[in-house]
Image: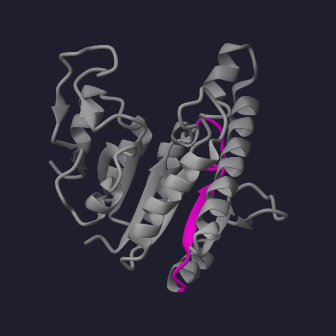
Amino acid sequence: MYKRVIIKLSGEALKGDGTYGIHPLTVKKIATEIKDIHALGVDVGIVVGGGNLWRGKTGEELGMDRAQADYMGMLGTVMNSLALQDALESIDVPSRVMTVLPISTVAEPYIRRRAMRHFEKNRVLIFAGGTGTPYFSTDTAAALRAAELDAKIILMAKNGVDGVYDKDPKKHQDATMYDALTQEDILVKKLGVMDQTAASMCHENKIDVIVFNLNTSGNMKKAILEEPIGTKVSWEG
C-alpha cells in the first residue's frame, strides 16, 4: 500500500453535472472517498485545479494578458480548496489549506517543513495556488509537491474518464484504453495525460501516476491498495 500520495483533483470534478461552479454534494462525495483512504493511515496531499471557475488559457483567448489570467485561475483553486476543506471537516477529517499565494486570512502559506509536520499530525493537506507562477499548470504543481514531499505516486482523478486512451473516448467510439504506460510514452506520444513539464518531473523524480475515473465509487481506495485500476503510468521504461 502506498504510504504517501498526492491526489490531482481537477476543478471540473467539483462541478458535478453543472457546466461550471462548485456543487456541494459532489464535493461531499469526493471528501468521503478521501476519508476512506485517510482512514488507512495514508498521508494525503491534494492539488486542486480551478477549471470549473476559470482557465488562464480561456482568458488569453479572450484577449487578456496570459499572466493576469493565470493568476485569476490560481485564485479559483483557493476557492475550490476551501470548499473541499469544509466538506472534509464536516465529516471529521482534519485538514489544512496551504497556498503559495499569500492569503493568510483563509489559508496557511506553503512551507515544506510545515507540510511535513502536518503529515506527522495526520492531517490532510490541500495545496492551492498551483505553482504560484503563471504558465505552469496544476499538473506541474502536483508533480512538484510529490517530489518535494517524497510521495512516490500521484493519483490523477478524472471526471468521467476511466484512464488514458489513444484518442478522445468522448469523440471516438473505437478509442482504446491503455492499461500501462511510461512517462516516456506520454512525452513521445503527446497523449495529454498531463503537460510535458509535469511528465518530465515525474520521470526525473521516479514518481508513478495512476489515472482513474473519480466518478466510480471506491476507485480512489483501490488505487491506494495497488489494485488494477485505470492506467498506470510508470516513471521507468
Tell me where residue 94 appears, x and y as whole percent: 60, 76
Tell me where residue 204 appears, x and y as whole percent: 32, 54
Determine the residue located farthest toward the right in the rendered image. Answer: 105
Question: 221 left or right of 132?
Answer: left
Tell me where residue 226 appears, x and y as whole percent: 21, 62
Residue 150 visible in rendering: no
Most foreground residue, 141 or 105: 105
Residue 109 visible in rendering: yes
Residue at point 24%, 27% (across, down): 189
Question: Height in image: 93 above or below 221?
Answer: below
Question: Height in image: 44 above or below 80?
Answer: below
Most foreground residue, 105 or 189: 105
User: Picture quarter containing residue 154?
Assistant: bottom left
Question: 69 left or right of 142?
Answer: right
Question: Height in image: 176 above or below 86?
Answer: above
Question: 97 left or right of 190?
Answer: right
User: Picture quarter containing residue 180?
Assistant: top left
Residue at point 50%, 53% (across, down): 29
User: Picture quarter containing residue 182?
Assistant: top left
Determine the residue located farthest toward the bottom in the rendered image. Answer: 121
The quarter of the image holding the N terminus is bottom left
Is 124 in the magenta? yes
Main SS of the magenta part reads loop
Most foreground residue, 107 or 220: 220
Is 133 in the magenta? yes
Q: What's the magenta region?
A: 121-135
Q: What colour scheme has been applied to the protein in the rendered image?
A: one colour
Most foreground residue, 128 or 18: 18
